[in-house]
Amino acid sequence: MALHHVPGCPFVFRIDGIVLPCNFCFFFFFFLVPQKYAYPADELMPLSCKGRVRGLEPNRGDIDDSLGKFSLTLIDTLDTLVVLNKLEEFEEAVKRVTKDVRLDNDIVVSVFETNIRVLGGLLGAHVMADMLRGQGKRMQWYQDELLHMAKELGYRLLPAFNTTSGLPYPRVNLRYGVLNPLSRTGTESDTCTACAGTMILEFAALSRLSGEAVFEEHARKALDVLWDKRQRGSDLVGTVINIHSGDWVRRDSGVGAGIDSYYEYLMKAYILLGDNVYLERFNTHYSAIMKYISQPPLLLSVHMHNPTVSVRSWMDSLLAFFPGLQVLRGDLKPAIETHEMLYQVTQQHKFLPEAFTTEFRVHWGQHPLRPEFAESTYFLYKATGDPYYLKVGQSIVEKLNAHARVPCGFAAVQDVRTGTHEDRMDSFFLAEMFKYLYLLFSEKSQLPIDIDNYIFTTEAHLLPVSLSTTQSPCRGNSTPILPAEEDIFTYSCPSAQILFPNNPSFAKTIRDSYKYLTGVGRAPHAAASGGQKGTYRVKLIAEVSQTPEEEEVVPLVVQLISPPFLGRTVLTAGPAKFGMDLTKEEHGPNTGTSGRSAPYSACGSIENAEELHGNIALALRGDCMFAAKARRLQEAGAIGVIFIDHREGSSSEETPLFQMVGDGGSTSDITIPLVFLFSREGDVLTRALEEHRNVDVLLLPRERQMGRGCYSMCVAFFRETKSASGEQGCHHPTVAGAQ
Ligand code: DMJ
């Protein structure tokens, strides 16, 4: 493998064939632009080539709550300068900030945004300044000015926590706090979960660096409240909570907008602070997310009290951070799957739209240059070393240059469908997007810091993991912990070697199962094959999960009835919306001897039709539609099909059942019964087949599964009926079970 230096660029490419346009170098140029056109304003207006000053521009509502007249973009970008090795520029910028920035403006700001962008920015920059000072060459004049500013800002945010519950108000007046008559805030009763639950990294770092416990105590208390208010049945949280009563105001639960960084901060608080309480909580939530919300490649939103009900048919772009968090958790497979889906959405629409449907259509077309997808790409590259993720990064850079770059910076996209621009460049573009892309393409040895010694806050500010060994100024947490389901990564670090032994191309193998989700990149003839013209894009995803909100999935079972199982082995199965309706009494349980189809996917012509004739066929999910498989197997003479999930390790205990749906056309020709087993249940059946060659099974609704008393009678009846008349199976459980 050859390393290529690009003249004038600080980047080294790791593999042959990947050549980033040198346009990427312009990133650095544009980094200086906000200072030229906008300083000391909070943000650059890249179309007008001037600074955005709150009050001087038309009010944009909540978005403007990030702007506190404190040179937001410069503070948010300080530690990016160090990552870029622009140490002279960093030193100058720190001087500017310490000289010019005031934190006591009479202005109402968002507590969440000010914490992650400004407090986080000051702390990240202080850590860098302290490190450079310690090296003895630069920053020798520095006397912890940034830390003093951080402490001042921390005290200005603290009044927000003055509620009976301990959950913070969403806004605070930097000069007058919350309840002061001059504050013009304090009337709010709600906040978002992420808003209340994304304080601990910055506040704990501030406490540990300053020695003042009050910050960490307040952030921890807010987390305790959220944990206490989780829905005990599902272990999920809602999106909006009442800050006084702690009652949920919005009970939809996902991993994107409104909740995202709450989960992120539980995991990262454990990494930064070394406190098991956070890890235990994270693990409990994570199991719930993987059970109800993650349906790879999708991340759905569900009702926290009734989590098998999905509440909307679209996803928001903020959830794109989640694969990165899954990498930290060591759960690479779903991370790869979801990231691949997101990549395909960006290929189809150039950028991730703010919201897109589960069929990957634009729901809300805005793209404010959010960094979450680049963030996940960086973490996946770090974890897998797969050059594929460099190519993904390259495509992000190219699209930014082609569709967002304007003479005075990078402009948010108003609608990905039209490509129109907005006069807006949020500070997270330089703080996060820029940093993650730079890190993706840089060698560890080129960086002025050992990046592995730091944790990224949600705004990508760098806090040293060594803080975990700094004495906590807080009392220990006494919140009782519920035991979480454990797996090998519950308490250990992720390792691709353990996850995917002897399989260096594991990431590709996983991605290949999710190719062409959006139809982009697929050869045109492929979409047309099998008479599915023009509907391919919708259909592929339609197979994954499209259970309408109100529609209940009736659980079925596959019950193994021949000796030695005699009905004791019962596997939970999902139904299909087509084929025989097993829930109808008149069909009775459907019986047959099962055997694997060849090919196992049943996507080509069936080679073992003779063997399958009169039997129930087993077919692996993937490669073609359920309906196509069923049709082919029915033609081959199978009397039913058991589909088995191709996602290793999936099980009905962890994943809600869903209904298989047809191919968009008529499926009335398919009349045999069809059921779906997740792979763990499928393994039980295939092992049984390996050991016993023929295994008689019943396919029937769970509520009608055979009771213990009826097995031998049912089997006898089954065998008699089968040999006498060629008919298959018991006609009705009660007949077979008649005592
Ligand atoms: C950033 O400010 C942070 O990452 C935050 O947690 C949510 N997302 C924005 C950028 O999209």
Image: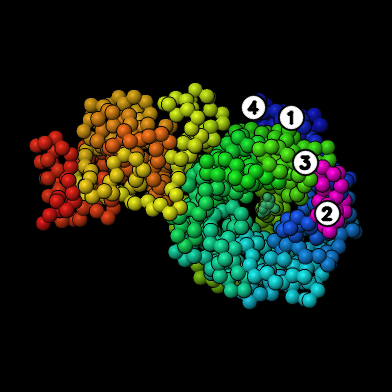
Respond yes or no on whether mark 4 lies under 8 Å from ligand 1.
no
Which badge, 2 or 4, comes first in the chain's sequence?
4
**Majority SS type along the magenta span:** loop
Kind of residue indicated by mark 2:
Glu
Q: Nearer the viewer, mark 1 or mark 4?
A: 1
Q: Is residue 493 magenta?
A: no
Which residue is label 4 attached to? Answer: 1
Which badge, 2 or 1, comes first in the chain's sequence?
1
Q: Which residues are magenta?
A: 39-58
Residue 281 position, x and y percent, is 53, 62
Residue 468 visible from this viewpoint: no
Residue 551 position, x and y percent, is 40, 52
Q: Is residue 50 magenta?
A: yes
Kind of residue indicated by mark 3:
Phe
Which badge, 3 or 1, comes first in the chain's sequence?
1
Residue 262 position, x and y percent, is 60, 59
Q: Are marks 2 and 1 in contact (CB under 8 Å)?
A: no
| Cα distance in 3D space between marks 2 and 1 | 36 Å
| Cα distance in 3D space between marks 2 and 4 | 52 Å
